[in-house]
Amino acid sequence: MSEIAKPLARYAAFRRAGDYVFLSGIIPVDPSRGMIVRGFADIPAEAARAIGATGEFSTDFKQGPILAQSWYVLDRVRATVEAAGGGMADVVKLVQYFVNLDHFPLYSRVRGLFFPGEAPVSTVVGVSGLMPSADVLVEVEATAYLPRRQPS
Amino acid sequence: MSEIAKPLARYAAFRRAGDYVFLSGIIPVDPSRGMIVRGFADIPAEAARAIGATGEFSTDFKQGPILAQSWYVLDRVRATVEAAGGGMADVVKLVQYFVNLDHFPLYSRVRGLFFPGEAPVSTVVGVSGLMPSADVLVEVEATAYLPRRQPS
Amino acid sequence: MSEIAKPLARYAAFRRAGDYVFLSGIIPVDPSRGMIVRGFADIPAEAARAIGATGEFSTDFKQGPILAQSWYVLDRVRATVEAAGGGMADVVKLVQYFVNLDHFPLYSRVRGLFFPGEAPVSTVVGVSGLMPSADVLVEVEATAYLPRRQPS
Amino acid sequence: MSEIAKPLARYAAFRRAGDYVFLSGIIPVDPSRGMIVRGFADIPAEAARAIGATGEFSTDFKQGPILAQSWYVLDRVRATVEAAGGGMADVVKLVQYFVNLDHFPLYSRVRGLFFPGEAPVSTVVGVSGLMPSADVLVEVEATAYLPRRQPS
Amino acid sequence: MSEIAKPLARYAAFRRAGDYVFLSGIIPVDPSRGMIVRGFADIPAEAARAIGATGEFSTDFKQGPILAQSWYVLDRVRATVEAAGGGMADVVKLVQYFVNLDHFPLYSRVRGLFFPGEAPVSTVVGVSGLMPSADVLVEVEATAYLPRRQPS
Amino acid sequence: MSEIAKPLARYAAFRRAGDYVFLSGIIPVDPSRGMIVRGFADIPAEAARAIGATGEFSTDFKQGPILAQSWYVLDRVRATVEAAGGGMADVVKLVQYFVNLDHFPLYSRVRGLFFPGEAPVSTVVGVSGLMPSADVLVEVEATAYLPRRQPS
Amino acid sequence: MSEIAKPLARYAAFRRAGDYVFLSGIIPVDPSRGMIVRGFADIPAEAARAIGATGEFSTDFKQGPILAQSWYVLDRVRATVEAAGGGMADVVKLVQYFVNLDHFPLYSRVRGLFFPGEAPVSTVVGVSGLMPSADVLVEVEATAYLPRRQPS
Amino acid sequence: MSEIAKPLARYAAFRRAGDYVFLSGIIPVDPSRGMIVRGFADIPAEAARAIGATGEFSTDFKQGPILAQSWYVLDRVRATVEAAGGGMADVVKLVQYFVNLDHFPLYSRVRGLFFPGEAPVSTVVGVSGLMPSADVLVEVEATAYLPRRQPS
Amino acid sequence: MSEIAKPLARYAAFRRAGDYVFLSGIIPVDPSRGMIVRGFADIPAEAARAIGATGEFSTDFKQGPILAQSWYVLDRVRATVEAAGGGMADVVKLVQYFVNLDHFPLYSRVRGLFFPGEAPVSTVVGVSGLMPSADVLVEVEATAYLPRRQPS
Amino acid sequence: MSEIAKPLARYAAFRRAGDYVFLSGIIPVDPSRGMIVRGFADIPAEAARAIGATGEFSTDFKQGPILAQSWYVLDRVRATVEAAGGGMADVVKLVQYFVNLDHFPLYSRVRGLFFPGEAPVSTVVGVSGLMPSADVLVEVEATAYLPRRQPS
Amino acid sequence: MSEIAKPLARYAAFRRAGDYVFLSGIIPVDPSRGMIVRGFADIPAEAARAIGATGEFSTDFKQGPILAQSWYVLDRVRATVEAAGGGMADVVKLVQYFVNLDHFPLYSRVRGLFFPGEAPVSTVVGVSGLMPSADVLVEVEATAYLPRRQPS
Amino acid sequence: MSEIAKPLARYAAFRRAGDYVFLSGIIPVDPSRGMIVRGFADIPAEAARAIGATGEFSTDFKQGPILAQSWYVLDRVRATVEAAGGGMADVVKLVQYFVNLDHFPLYSRVRGLFFPGEAPVSTVVGVSGLMPSADVLVEVEATAYLPRRQPS
């Protein structure tokens, strides 16, 4: 679960350019398993608990998809930035696409767990669709600042 | 009216990273008043006149929302960039999201007033929705280039 | 066909800021001819052949619009980056907007021709509309890394 | 806020029949003020905090309406049952109508606060509309068991 | 017109259980004639006059269907409760389903004629459809309290 | 398959109040397996045969979902009433919600098998949705009359 | 409330031409207050009572908008014709536009109060929208016959 | 069939004002029979033949409604103008409302039969609905010039 | 461009009746060229400049259709009234139909150029369609007062 | 009821060509009566019973239209093939068009009665409409093999 | 115009098999010119006159597309059958697909001109779309009987 | 995978009639496994490669369903014709139904692999649905010419 986001097509998971690391938009798809994350069952149990799985069927059935997808994409942002030599604190910008903006409060709660310190800048828009299917509810594009040499 | 854009959730209004200043996407919402800008009445009278308020009820009722929102978001871009130590001339890139692309010509007229000199690069897309409600018609994400030391 | 993307309104085709070159979102519109690219007939014949024109009326009628638009916008990305002093290999990031995400595989095939080497990072989203009309199927926003002086 | 639910038309707020007390369907409307509850601002501040107001504009703007309406209708169920001489523990059955079933998890969280002990039976359905306007998101119909003489 | 509501399928028109009489949901269908009530012509003329037939074609054409159906279902509630040994004053609860909630004020006016005294509790919801066809605009489910022996 | 309906959230499967037993609305979901009943494969084979499985793929694919769900919810009504000490003959009232009223004739055929004797009163309405997802086609709410002591 | 209809844009409230007085289409907007009439609260209390305000919240909430708008536009027709030197009896023709033709019976009842004598000719059509917003439900265009000199 | 158009509500079929005769908008409804004209069977057989009834079921089923309604409304315009003392040649203006503008060519052919000589001015618009129901496809409003005394 | 509006079917472009001249509804179609006006390219260049062509592709592409159509129909009103012996100052009444009422402000600006003096009375409605196709955005029906002999 | 299918327009009910007999697509319309089959009442009573009329109003109202139409079109296929000198056993191919594919199982049950022996090949598709109106739910096109001389 | 229908993709225009000639479905597209037939201007003038061009702009604009397409596809059926050695009298079966069944009467009139003698069998269905674009309104599939040797 | 198409209901997979073999419409459903073909994983790997599986997740996710279904239905056409004693070269006619005509180019590419020689005649239409569910994207109906004795 901590592997970097593998590109789903012919593109790079991240590219360093000068002091910045650009990440491709990340969707809740695990290409190695050929599977879209659809609910709490598709993420580690401790993660599910941490982000609000209640154990009540109806509530988890309704909120599970966006909560689990939010965790998955942010966890892959983390893994990818770490692969580039940094950490979540180095992420300076997020662009977040939702197919249903009513999902924002649930995503926002998960994001707070990943960014306990200084928050990145954030753009949120509602889109008409995300790749590769209507089951994908959120996409996150991150930019990190990782200067090659720390200012001395 | 000239205060910087306060974030509406747990995110930063802007983040400096190296020579760049990234701004969060700005929507026409005044969080201190808990209010969405809906028309000319929600912006200063001189601003309304400058961007084309006609005083005719029907015309202002129709064009007021997008004109006033355009002014408000661009004015907050300005205030935020100034808070970061720069000015509108330092804005190099804009991504602009509209829920109705027919609003572009009116937005474009307002934008011309804020960028009398060299224009930033610009991306315009139509989206299915913006936060936090259907009353929000436009969101603008800006990037500024503010090198720490001017080349000497 | 190799001229840089002329802005369709008051904005810059590209802006250098430090070591980066930002491009405006490019749509398949030729402003000098006031024309939206609509099919194979609107691009050079060799380009049409290269991206998959079959000569069968029904197939070309269906796939021509997105294939030709994909070629056109990427060719203008190329021309614009070259005008800024670089090449496709310097493009580090692409954000790609589609009005119909089913078009992605066809676009992706064309993009492979423009980036035979290392691929840029990529974000793909489905949007509700693009400027200036419903005939526009794809918009591409590119960022290039062109350091003024190569590190020695 | 603790007054019983006044009927909005020619019908009774509650009717005792034998050992049962039937309540009319309760909607989040305060007829004395002629006002539909629309968000946290329309309920007491301590109630808002108790049911999950975060203070973050975007989140509260999205979740406020259903959370506040859930609190209001259940609080009026409570006040009405108390007016009939009972308490929430005497409520044995709830029928709950939603215009958007995605609201159920938020309603369910609020309901848990009103029924800390044995829960009533519950029916949940999604309906095409509620009185008197599209701003009303939830209606709750309660039945209480209040035997005239406790079994000795 | 005063016969009890015959069930349209395998179910009971009413069932006594203890001191209560439960009625099936009643729709404006006359199964003996195999006919849905569609306007003033399908109910007695004096009833039509009593509930607001104006004699003006356009007005009666628009309001006739819901007014006549309201009268018909409430009249069958009355006949059914009488068949069970009670009267309208014994009806303690109504659940009313509408396919168009704008019909409520007209229904409400008719209901007032049937319940001149103490009103039953009432729940009103908008539904996506009623049996057996889209011509049915309203369904009413009634519960009566008819204790076998009056308390002495 | 004969276990009582376990509540999917914080509510009771049934509540006795005086001589009545109220059941929560039952949907075709097996919470122990976290699974929605979707067709004949999800119910016992003898049940499938009894309610009309034909063995022809196209017919069973079309009619299987509503037939199997109808059997499942009514079987759980039965198990729940039995857990409360009664039987199907004690059920006096049913409220039945459908997302597609064209399903009624198939449901009605199954219901006839569960109520060979005196039928309960019945209300049928079409709703815009049922919990927890669009795969749920029917919900049944039952009320039983189970006097503690038979009148002597 | 008896002032003539002020034009909402660059047009005349009325124009005399020969023996006729033409009125602009009148919508329920009070330009001096910049306000659309939305219900009984926006018209004089005695007018509300005269046109059917019931005091019941649900009914008035549903019927208030069209009843109040009907009164307002017809009252402004009256005031405008009086400003031109005539009265309602001089109005010979009305063209009436509705966004929802189900509103006609309520409008018709109000119109009857304004034209107790000989009625004008009347055209009624359903339109897809009225200026300046979807809150406007009715527009009335009147023509009056006011000969300069009575035939002697 | 030659009687004048009886008003369907409280309004005049026509009003003379000076030298003009204004007609109410005429719809294909026969109020004496309480019936909307729906096809060739509702008009005289010779009229049906004259306007294009073919005797082929499918064609007549498709084109009958608009052809018969066109004939009916124009025939009533004729009868009403004659009742006012004039004839079709005196009709100077028509406003014609259609719910489906594809019906215009068929209406136009019928209109040509009623105005063999000088044609009136004509306005044609597509509307969202006509009174009293969706079965009404066309409404015609006519104005006639009938000077009291011919200029000598 | 100054020719009178030729009728597109069997009707008159204008008809004098007494002191009035009635014009048929005018749409932006040039029947001699069999062409619908679609943008600035279809009207004289000086007219395009006068009504707000900006030369920016995106803005003109969006606003061109309604601005050019507005100019065209009003210019034909002018030409037709002049053919009848009058001028724009003699136009006393306009009925204006729009398929999209958001176009009104742009139309209104153009209309102001044609009526620099006293404005006619005006009715504005949104319709579901105009002849002959969805490309037509506006229709204008004008009435002029042209007394045969000026009062002496 | 056993007459061959009369064509509804200028086409043949059947055509022999070599050893094959081609039938026109048959819809449930009786052109001699000018009537579309709408339910059990429009077919012989014994046929209704044979195909599943239950006598319960709600069920028959829902399933009657497709069952009766299925019987009618297949009975006319039979009558037409018999008129051509063959029988149902000679029908080798059916193409069946439905406006609602959920109707297939009911149609299929009826078809089984008409083809007790070897079944023809079958194609089933869902279409957007059938002639002459939306009341027509199914159309069947049959081909029969009727060699002029039986092989000896 | 009399050339046979060239296939638009990899398929045959016609295939003889035994005594039958099967034609591919023909759409109103001229592949040699890469053009869809859109109106009277795309067919020979004498054909346009023969099938009902009126010369009135509005009528021809509305009816031209389907009339011209009907003529074109039937003319290509004719040319193709002639290329196979037969004539229209040999066509025994037609399957006709329409995107709008209201077009049938106009198509039927044109078809009558092509089949003055014995008519083929005919199937008519409404489909959701035809190749290659929404401008195509009709497709016709024909089968001809052309025995190699006439029976002697 | 080479078994003949088993009928999904009571109908024949193919029927010989004279020299022709008629096939039922074939859909991408494997009745023995009770499974609809949904992507490359449901067909043999070598078939997937042959028809264009790329190994890139996003592209295969988008194009896999129609490509795999196209292969599956054509492979079953082949197996069925072979069971009747012929081969693909004997197929003379195909009717192909699509729920989304944009799928045609992908289907067409697959069809080319199955018909390397002379192509059959072809009809392509877009339909509103196919059996048994919305997951089915294509249906193919084939006719083969297999004379019992070759002409000598």
Image: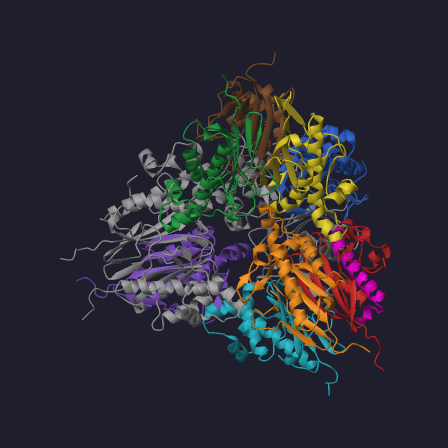
Chain colours: B purple, D cyan, E red, F orange, H blue, J yellow, K brown, L green
Q: Which span is picked out in magenta?
A: E61-90
Examine the rendering and report whether any part of residue H114 can be seen: yes
Examine the rendering and report whether any part of residue H57 can be seen: no
Report the magenta stretch's main SS: helix
Residue B77 image offset from top left, x and y in percent: 37, 63
**Relative side of B4 to H98, left or right:** left
Q: Quadrant of the N terminus of chain F?
A: bottom right
Task: Pick out the residue farthest to the front.
Answer: J152
Residue E84 image offset from top left, x and y in percent: 83, 67
Residue K141 image offset from top left, x and y in percent: 55, 29
Q: Quadrant of the C terminus of chain F?
A: bottom right
Residue H2 belongs to the span the image colors magenta = no
Residue at 78% in and 40% down:
J44
Residue H119 image offset from top left, x and y in percent: 67, 31
Given residues D51 and L59, the one toward you in this image is L59
Marker count (numbered): 0
Task: Pick out the residue farthest to the top.
Answer: K152
Residue E81 belongs to the span the image colors magenta = yes
Residue at 81% in and 61% down:
E75
Is E27 above or below relative to L79? below
Given residues H44 and H92, the one toward you in this image is H44
Is B49 above or below relative to D139? above
**Relative side of E4 to L12, left or right:** right
User: Which quadrant would residue H84 be assigned to in this image?
Assistant: top right
